[in-house]
Image (tube, rainbow, N blue to C red):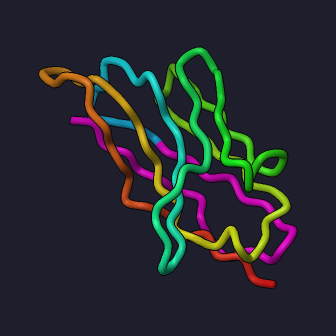
Amino acid sequence: QVQLVESGGGLVQAGGSLRLSCAASGRPLSIPVMGWYRQAPGKQRELVATINLGGSTNYADSVKGRFTVSRDNAKNIVYLEVTSLKPEDTAVYYCHAVATATGSGLGTYWGQGTQVTVSS
């Protein structure tokens, strides 16, 4: 099993910035993809950004140019730098990973979520 623990959410004014972090534990053997999704009240969970082991990234159109995803492969940590925040970015942000673990095949894992609230 792989556990994902997020940190770094909070309340910020529009135009502000935050840095979200997500650490994977549980002795994953490999984490080909890590990333972030978000879910706003009354809406479906949506992709924010992903990054693979080679560093290739993918972003939702709504966050391109404002959010940056990165990862530390040695520490199994993925980061999300969020800048120029807008009220519509308010959501619970979930860490996501596709990983293999000892005794398991390839699986999908989710963190518990961290709240980001942007005030206008």
Residue 10 appears at what percent x and percent y? Answer: 62, 71
Residue at 51% from the left image edge and 35% from the top image edge: 77
Residue found at the very far bottom of the displayed protein? 120
Q: Is residue 2 magenta?
A: yes
The picture places residue 70, in percent across and down from the top left corner, at 65, 33
* Residue segment shown in magenta: 1-22
Question: Image quadrant of residue 117?
Answer: bottom right
Report the label total: 0
- Is 120 located above or below residue 43 in the figure? below
- Residue in the picture at 50% in, 73% down: 43
Looking at the image, which residue sits at the far top? 54
Q: Main secondary structure of the magenta part?
A: strand
Is residue 6 or residue 60 the one in the foreground? Answer: 60
Question: In the visual, does 90 lie left or right of 43?
Answer: right
**Residue 89, horizontal then vertical, whole percent:** 68, 68
Q: Quadrant of the C terminus?
A: bottom right
The quarter of the rendered structure image containing the N terminus is top left
Q: Position of residue 56 (x, y in %)?
A: 64, 22
Taking depth in this image into account, of 119 and 49 the one nearest to the observer is 49
* Residue 85 left/right relative to 22: right
Q: Residue at x 78, y 70 (%)?
A: 86
Residue sticking out furthest to the left? 103
Whether residue 14 is in magenta: the answer is yes
Residue in view at x 50 percent, y 45 percent? 22
